[in-house]
Image: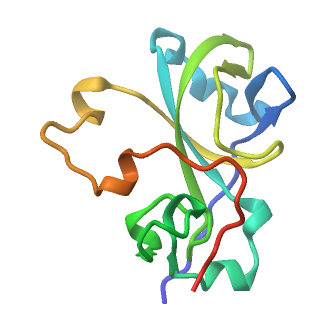
């Protein structure tokens, strides 16, 4: 098994109304030019799920909905997976210094940010894509995730 190191470049900060990404000072120069984009792709670590048990989960009912078919974690966006990497596309509201204010993010407060990529529609949008029916339905609000 190959091993390698990944370093956090910042962290997600959330309160009841505001979501930001605080980039650590030593990586702030990497933000140059990001203010020219409307959206950013944020890769972060599901640190609150980082247990051997959650890393060993390979199948879930997507969206924590038991009526959805049992599905491999590589075929859905479950936070339980071998490598706990999350991905969100976020609208940039402002960038001041090393802080990016965003519209929202599906991450917990203090989640480590491992990378940012500018969102480029011509490269990041796929034509003629298709998904299973469950992926087009709204999410349930608070059921617990069922895993097998």
Image spot of residue 33 (x, y percent): 50, 15
Indicate whether 134 appears above or below 119.
Answer: below
Residue farthest bottom in this picture: 1
Question: Which residue is farthest left?
Answer: 128
The quadrant holding residue 107 is top right
Relative height, residue 122 to residue 87 (above, below): above
Q: Quadrant of residue 98?
A: top right
Q: In the rendered view, does 70 fall on the left or right side of 87?
A: left
Left/right placement of residue 25 relative to residue 32 reads right
Please provide percent x and percent y for residue 10.
73, 40
Could you tell me residue 24's position as x and y percent? 77, 35
* Residue drawn at point x = 51 percent, y = 18 percent: 34
In the rendered image, the residue lying farthest to the front is: 67
Q: Residue at x 68, y 55 (%)?
A: 7
Q: Quadrant of the C terminus?
A: bottom right
- Point 55% across, 18% down: residue: 32
Residue 138 is situated, as x and y percent measured from the top left of the image, at 49, 43
């Amino acid at each position: 098994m190959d091993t390698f190191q990944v370093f956090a470049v910042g962290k997600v900060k959330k309160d009841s109304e505001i979501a930001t990404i605080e980039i650590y000072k030593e990586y702030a120069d990497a933000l140059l030019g990001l203010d020219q984009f409307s959206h950013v792709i944020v890769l972060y670590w599901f640190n609150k799920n980082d247990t051997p048990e959650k890393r060993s989960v390979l199948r879930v009912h997507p969206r924590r909905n038991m009526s959805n078919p049992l599905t491999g974690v590589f075929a859905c966006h479950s936070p339980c997976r071998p490598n706990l990497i999350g991905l969100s596309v976020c609208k940039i509201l402002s960038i001041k210094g090393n802080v990016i204010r965003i519209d929202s993010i599906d991450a917990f407060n203090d989640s480590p940010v491992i990378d940012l990529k500018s969102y480029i529609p011509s490269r990041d949008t796929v034509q003629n894509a298709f998904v299973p029916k469950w992926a087009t339905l709204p999410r349930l609000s608070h059921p617990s995730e069922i895993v097998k």
